[in-house]
Image (spheres, grey):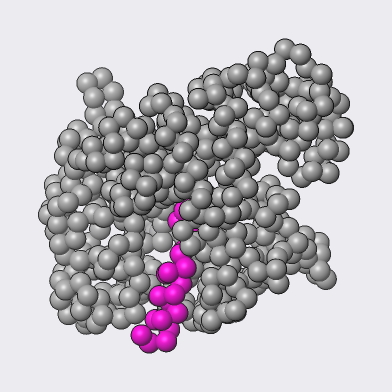
Amino acid sequence: MKFSELSKYLERLEKTPSRIEITKILAEVFSKTNSEETDLTTYLLLGSLAPSYKGVVFNIAERMMIDVLAKAYNSEKHKVMALYKKLGDLGDVATELAQTSNIKSRKFNLSVSQVYNQLLDLAKDEGEKSVERKIAKMAKLLADLDPLSARYVARIPVGRLRLGFSDKTILDSLSWMETGNKSKKAKLEKAYQVIPDVGLLAKRVKEFGIDKATKNIVPIVGIPVLPMLPQRIKSPTEMIEKMGKVFVEPKFDGLRVLIHYKKEKTKEQVMAFTRNLNNVVDMFSELKDVGKHVHARELILDTEAIGMDPEVKRMVDFQTTMQRRRKYEIEMKAKEIPLRFQVFDIVYKDGESLMDLPYYERREILKKVIKDDELLIVDDAVVAEDPKVIVSEYNEKIKAGLEGVVVKRYDTAYIPGRTGWRWVKMKQSESELGKLADTVDCVVMGYTQGRGKRASFGVGQFLVGVRDGNDIKTVTKVGTGLTDEQFRILKKRLKKIETKKRPKNYIVSKLLEPDYWVEPSLVVEIAADEITKSPNHSAGLALRFPRLVRFRDDKDPRNATTVEEVQKLFRMQKGF
């Protein structure tokens, strides 16, 4: 497929508010791609070059893209900046410059694969003078594109393509391409949970069809499985009623990490994936020798990384643990805040998927695999069939300074995501933070200009929402719970993701529109006193007396709380 043809589809997608129409357009795109370019097309549709776990980044900021546009279209930088200020979108700037420039050597016939490969070459360019090379390569690429194609290619490196759909919509469209409906969506979603590479899955569907492409999907070392997540239930009595026999385990306030290990003849391969599928193994130097701590050739372990105070041998809080997520001074921080990994599940061992085994069997395998030392420690677990045991364990863990307990069905399979009553968390009452049974992980959508004392911060309140499919729907505005320093940090972070236009998947009442919109990338944990019905908030519910608990840099919008989960919290507070 020529990129000029793809760009026409991108324009249709950008102008289409209907979710079902977006699905149909994407299905049409996939019906026209050949299998060799299907994965590349998929990534470009999502404004990327690879699944997030591969860590392919452009490192091109808006200022650099302005230099690119000036070079590509023989314009002066100050004129490009003025045009950007006027239009508010670098893609629109590229289109206007392309329409008015006098470049004669344009090719205009680049294929999707050619555009993808040039962008990938640019993203991988590192080292001395890489900035100059990136600018030159990007400028040449834009100069070879028609004005419409330039609009979308200019947006991709700065992360601003955002057409209002996600991986899940791609899965819908693959089903639609084959069946004319979403009847095979469940098969695709199940495969995606084990191998969350939508480009690879789309390529397999194109080659083999959905039934064959999704059959016998097993975990692969090096590709992160989507983690299993806990539900919320109001009381221990209800937990036993819904789950029967259970394991009760400690709930740690750390960083969720899936450890992948593979021993080959001459080398060992180690990876560590967070909930948002980023590989952070380079930040966790402790894991380089993880092979010495296990009895296996291949493993995928589900763990919680806990920061430790090396002097008193006690756990540190979540924010201190999060200091280990850094690109610089890694060894220094490793000495200041060494990590241990609480291991609570095993997904894969020596060529075999363990996901379908009952949990009690996986625990037995885990005990044999882990040597249990200062690096890897298997979680303690108490078997319970009586709610009183859950309460006793919970109280004991709270006294020990932990968050609470996780209650797991004794015979549950490992099923990614929140499905059924398999895992349930029981956290300490948020009495110091709010009166809800749990906090809510929200996406920051925009903010208002600060007034009075907050004028110096640049932020008065920030608007937050929760997920509803691909959409983000509002639940509250937050202006409390932040220190002065946190307000300043928040302003810096929001400024980096500020956008002139409301993102397409934001559902916001005009009454609640902020002064400034931001791209959906920052997740915050919010506590509140109660949830009420709301005619103004698009989620239909509102968090009352909200306050910031912490920034959740270990999560991205895919991991945010859903409207359905907020509805459950609402029912829980009402006692039904």
Question: Main SS of the magenta segment?
Answer: helix
Q: Nearer the viewer, residue 178 or 229?
A: 178
Q: Position of residue 68 (x, y in %)?
A: 73, 26
Question: Residue 458's quadrant in the figure?
Answer: bottom right
Q: Quadrant of the C terminus?
A: bottom left
Residue 573 covered by magenta stretch: yes
Where 276 sits versus 406, above or below?
above
List the single residue furthest toward the bottom: 575
Residue 307 covered by magenta stretch: no
Q: Residue at x 56, y 37 (%)?
A: 9
Where 445 sits versus 4, above or below?
below
Where 337 sits versus 404, above or below?
above
Q: Nearer the viewer, residue 218 or 304?
A: 218
Q: Position of residue 363 (x, y in %)?
A: 17, 55
| Horizontal side, residue 374 vs residue 98: left or right | left
Observer able to see residue 286: no
Magenta part of the protein: which range?
A: 554-576
List the single residue furthest toward the front: 180
Q: Nearer the viewer, residue 450 or 92?
A: 92
| Horizontal side, residue 367 vs residue 532: left or right | left
Question: Residue 110's quadrant in the figure?
Answer: top right
Where 34 sits versus 511, above or below?
above
| Horizontal side, residue 362 vs residue 442: left or right | left
Q: Residue at x 33, y 45 (%)?
A: 179
Q: Residue at x 41, y 81 (%)?
A: 571
Q: Residue at x 40, y 48 (%)?
A: 172
Q: Position of residue 568 (x, y in %)?
A: 40, 75
